Amino acid sequence: MSTTTIASLPEEILLTIFEYLDSAPPSRLKSRLEPTLDLTNSSNHALYKSLSQVSHSWRRIILPLLFRYSRLRLDAPPRKEWSQCPACGDNAPQSSSTANYPVDDSHQDLFASALQSASSTTTNDEPSRSPAFTLSTLHWASRIHHSLADYLAFLQRNNLAGAIHSFTILTNRMIADSDSRRFPHLTAGTSDHRYRASAELWQRLFETVPMLKRVVIVAPPSDLACLTNCAIDMFGDWAFEDMEFHILELEVDASPTTKADLNGGAATQGHGQTSISGDASSIPTTTSYVPTSYPGIAPSSVLKIRPWTHLALNEGSFLRAYGTYEYFERGPPSLIYSIKDCLSSRRTSLTSLRKFTYTAILPFANHCDLRGLLPHLTELDIKLAPDPTSNILQDKDRVGKAQMEDCWSEFFDAYRTITRPFRTFEIRPDGTPKLQRFVCRDVSTPGLVLELDEEFVPLCLPVWAEMEPGVFVRQEMCPPQYGSEIM
């Protein structure tokens, strides 16, 4: 009588068994916590790593699961091989020959254009920066290009491009604070070459991984703006010194329409939209990767390269800013203004967006005015208090000079600001805004439940029903007094 062992099982059965060991990525599990570069760290996938070392056949089966949720650290030390690059390496610029080191045309052209722009006269609209700043941005442009090139080469060697579900990119601060300016995008077309490198990163990524459905970026606010080709206002940056990182998450749902869009190979949401498919060596023009104004998003931004249905933004702690004089007059460096502007009636991008998730620690009420987003959303998910597992309010250094009375007053005012447009008797006769679901995550904090319940009384029947704590689902399109008017 023969004995069946796990080693004798068909690969299809082994794959099914291994899939039961899978878990949600840490970037999703920790997405509502205060942003840090540890977002993707987890020991859950240690088992997959161990199984991949059992045998060559098991490694072949496990690899797609192991790298289903992949990440890229831009601030990792550069590899020595990058110095051989004829475009940006130690001996660059060299001749256009790339026989000994492959380099694509866009990367070659970026550094050729950088040399040309350095020797040209700039306009007042695009002021130049110091040579040291320009060299620093070229250094990061090189990192962006070669980090992604190594990542994509690994995927292609192991036939993993079709297995990637989620891609997370992380970086610490790229440019020193002393080099910051109020509107960084003003030098995106002249001396800050990271903007072009970022646009090319997303173009190359989606050409190689066309079915990618989720992107997460963890970076300081100014660097997040650069990686997304957005305009940002850094005027109040000094007041938010403990707001080290933001998290931006973009996701496409798995609806049949979305799948058809992805399989079609292009997303054409608006004028100037970057094509998902096309010539891998195509080079974004100046007008495509540079935001033209504040607030604004460049056509080649990752925000526009896919028909995203879910956008999540986690902006971390506002605590330190409460200790500044007339704190309510300051705003954090945030992408939210460009996102709202892009969704306004005069814009044509992000039209597929249906769900918005916002997370922060005690943000100002005037920062939480989301009226510009509501006409486009069916679901709104909000978390504004520290996570119950956090000890930030017990840390005197983090609290600083903030008065907690002010913080909690702004907290409840923020929820009033958020919910006012879609309270039952504020909804218009035509049913707008057409929000279908509102989620308040802060009811998980026991000390806030009673006061939040009072704030949500205007979300009442027959329009809204609280289906579970903090989850309000729309039952009717409009309040009863409007019924006869729209029959």
Image (cartoon, helix red, strand yellow):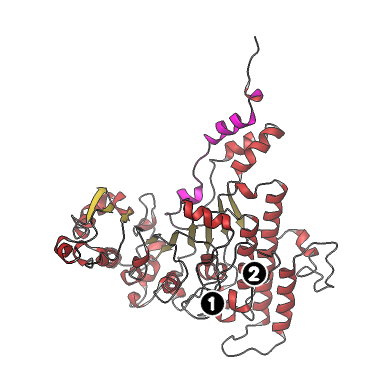
Q: Secondary structure at mark 2?
A: helix
Could you tell me which quadrant the C terminus lies in? Answer: bottom left
Give the spatial CA distance, label 1 vs label 2: 14 Å
Tell whether position 25 is magenta: yes
> Observer-nearest residue: 476 or 226?
476
Q: In which quarter of the view is residue 78 placed? A: bottom right
Kind of residue sitting beneath label 2: Ala
User: The residue tagged with tag 1: helix, strand or loop?
Assistant: loop
The picture places residue 316, in percent across and down from the top left corner, at 43, 62
Crowding around mark 1 (Cα neighbors within 10 Å: few <14, some 14 to 19, many 20+) is: many
Q: Position of residue 312 (x, y in %)?
A: 44, 59
Residue drawn at x 69%, y 33% as measured from the top left = 57
Which circle's residue, 1 or 2, is located before the other in the chain?
A: 2
Q: Residue furthest front?
A: 487
Residue 355: give its label. Answer: none
Q: Position of residue 341 (x, y in %)?
A: 42, 74
- Residue 291 circle label: 1
Q: Quadrant of the N terminus?
A: top right
Residue 197 — which label?
A: 2
Residue 214 visible somewhere in the drawing:
no
Magenta stretch encompasses residue 387: no
In this rendering, would 79 be left or right of 411? Answer: right
Q: Which residues are magenta?
A: 8-34
Would you say residue 246 is visible in this rendering?
A: yes
Question: Which amino acid is tagged 1?
Answer: Pro
